[in-house]
Image (cartoon, rainbow, N blue to C red):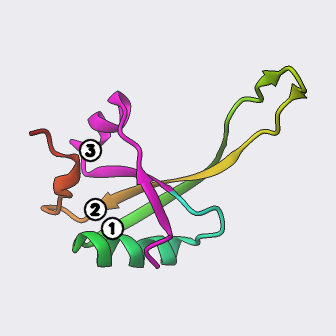
Amino acid sequence: MYYTIKRPLVTEKNSMLAEQGIFVFEVDKGASKPEIKRAVEKFFRVKVASIKTSICRNRARNTRMGASKVKYWKKAMVKLAPGQKISLFEGV
């Protein structure tokens, strides 16, 4: 279950979403929404209201050997219940 969430995605756009209670994570490609919900609720001890997922891809890179394979990864936008927050995303 803990391998479902790979890492939080911290960008300027995602920081603005965090103010609205939406947190963004890179998750395992095979993870379903219920698995992601259980992992977030258990790991961060919060209540999840909804989840949106999308499959993203990086650009192919040209090397001396030719073009490399495109890496696909999955992003989950987790909306928390009102009054809930994850302290990992708060500024120090």
Tell me if residue 31 comes above or below residue 68 in the rendering: below
Q: Residue at x 31, y 79 (%)?
A: 42
- Residue type beneath disc 2: Leu
What are the residue bounds of the magenta stretch? 1-26
Task: Please indicate whether residue 39 sits to the left or right of residue 59 in the image.
Answer: left
Residues 22 and 75: in front is 75
11 magenta-colored:
yes
Specify the amino acid type for callout 1: Ala
Could you classify mark 3 by the number of other residues whose Cα lies within 10 Å: few (under 14), some (14-19), or many (20 or more)?
A: many
Q: Secondary structure at mark 2?
A: strand
**Residue that numbered label 2 is attached to:** 80
Q: Badge 1 local density, few (<14 within 10 Å), some, or many (20+)?
A: some
- Place residue 79 in its image quadrant: bottom left
Nearer the viewer's eye, disc 3 or disc 1?
3
Farthest residue, direction front = 64
What's the CA distance linking mark 3 and mark 2?
Answer: 10 Å
Location of residue 92 in the rendering, given as x and y in whole percent from the top left corner: 9, 39
Q: Secondary structure at mark 1?
A: strand
The quarter of the displayed image where residue 29 is located: bottom right
Residue drawn where x is 49% and y is 71% of the image: 3
**Residue bearing the label numbered 3:** 18
Between disc 3 and disc 2, whose residue precedes?
Answer: 3
**Residue 49 - label:** 1
